[in-house]
Image (tube, rainbow, N blue to C red):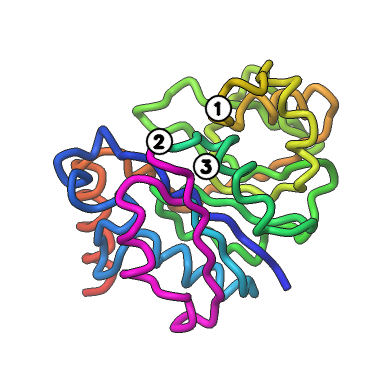
Amino acid sequence: MRHALIFAAGRGERMRPLTDTTPKPLLPVGGKPLIVWHLEKLAAAGVNYVVINTSHLAEQFPDALGDGSRWGLRIRYAYEGAEPLETGGGMLNALSLLGDAPFIAISGDIWTDADFTTLPLEPTGLAHLLLVDNPPHHPDGDFALDAHGLVHDTGTARLTFSGIGVYRPQLLNNWRDVVEATDTQPTRFKLAPLLRAAMADAAVSGTHFRGTWTDVGTPQRLQELGQTLDSRQT
């Protein structure tokens, strides 16, 4: 059994007014909601259990996706509350549903033709990241990938994190130390500081994906993606 997590809790501020009434992962593109493209690819890759993080307009997800049976999946929903918990807090919030084995995690607001079967069942370290060429709106990238397949926080040939990775739950073991949290603070934090801490210990591997990938962050990019997908189907 292989598990996956889809981050779908964000408010999608840059996508307004579309996201005032519809969560960004449920916006239609190419004839189906954006998140359904992920569900289909996960099912094709042998995943049979998916946790979806929700917050903004959370009730729309089970209404649209149900229990996942139409894709041969079992879907569970991890509600984060009225305020999204960011990627790190969202992953922490979902861990009790994901179990102890490594899992795939995907941002709900991207589109890609990457083959998820190529992702490792288990990362050699704490995480394995799919990296892509830097898009025009993010020219400086996020991380560097060396010749041995290790990902670093610094380096000259930088790539952009695609929002797709495989993670061991142990990545979050010391999250309080990394994000300097206290018991009085909410568990709202980004995943990037935990990844950078793991990179410092050579515990993050990666792959440079050269296929199609889009960060669907604005109405214009959503429209452009839709035109691309429509042209492929004609």
Q: Is residue 28 magenta?
A: no
Q: Is residue 81 left or right of residue 231?
A: right
Query: Which quarter of the picture shows residue 61?
Result: bottom left
> Which element carries disc 2, helix, strand or loop?
loop
The answer to whether residue 147 is above or below residue 35 is above
Say which residue label 3 marks. Answer: 162
**Sequence order check, earlier mark of 2 and 1:** 2
Question: Which quadrant of the figure contains the C terminus?
Answer: bottom left
| Numbered disc in front, either 1 or 3 | 1
Residue type at numbered disc 3: Ser
Name the residue tied to disc 2: 83
Q: Residue beneath label 1, please?
A: 186
Q: Position of residue 206 (x, y in %)?
A: 70, 41
Residue drawn at the location 61% of the way across and 28% of the way down = 192
Cα–Cα span, label 1 and label 3 = 27 Å
Q: Nearer the viewer, residue 215 or 87?
A: 87
**Left or right of 84 on screen, residue 45:** right
> Measured from the top left, where is residue 124 in percent x and y?
85, 47
The nearer-to-camera label among 2 and 3 is 2
The Cα atoms of the two marked residues, 2 and 3, are separated by 24 Å
* 62 left or right of 140 in image: left
Residue at the location (58% across, 40% down)? 131
